[in-house]
Image: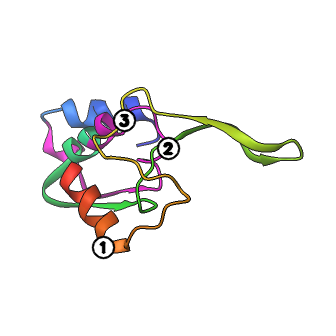
Amino acid sequence: ASSFDELENIGNNNNEDMLFSEASLLNVLDRCDNPGQLLEAAVGAIKPGGQLVLATVLPFSGRVHEGKMWSKWGKAASRRPISPLPIKSVPSNNKIPFELGVATFLEAI
């Protein structure tokens, strides 16, 4: 699927031939306005017994970046998602063990 709307339409379709056997969301859940809705749409677009591969930066800290990430004027502006995942964000300057980041993320989704 090339867009979020297309992914949602696939998941709402009752035709199993339209579903995917595998899908991936690579480094997008922490950067979109409604990661829960995106995750639900991706799961809904997968055949029963299929696989969804997720990749995200841990510890999870959802931020929507606007504009270029880096420019000659400095770092791009970022803000909280409109509908964030129910994960307690950890400021990037705080260090937590990787395992705790994974456990926190998996409990929330």
Q: Residue 72, percent across and down?
A: 89, 46
Callout 3, which amino acid? Answer: Pro
* Residue farthest front in this picture: 94
Q: State whether residue 107 is above or below residue 88.
A: below
Q: State whether residue 77 is above or below residue 101.
A: above
The residue tagged 1 is 99
What SS does tag 3 mark? loop
Instruction: Pick whichever of labels 1 and 3 is earlier in the sequence.
Output: 3
The residue tagged 3 is 84
In the rendered structure, the answer to whether residue 18 lies left or right of residue 84 reads left
| C-alpha gap between disc 2 and disc 1 | 21 Å
What SS does tag 2 mark? loop
Question: Is residue 102 magenta-colored?
Answer: no
Nearer the observer: mark 3 or 2; the answer is 3
The residue tagged 2 is 31
Q: Which quadrant of the view contains residue 26? A: bottom left
The foreground one among 18 and 91 is: 91
Callout 1, which amino acid? Answer: Glu
Q: Which quadrant of the view contains residue 25? A: bottom left
* Residue farthest right in this picture: 72
Residue at 22% over, 49% down:
108
Q: Which quadrant of the view contains residue 36? A: top left
| C-alpha gap between disc 1 and disc 3 | 21 Å
Give the magenta part as a residue range.
Answer: 15-39
- Res. 109 visible in picture: no
Q: Residue 89, percent across and down?
A: 40, 48
Query: Considering the image in quadrants, where does the N terminus appear?
Result: top left
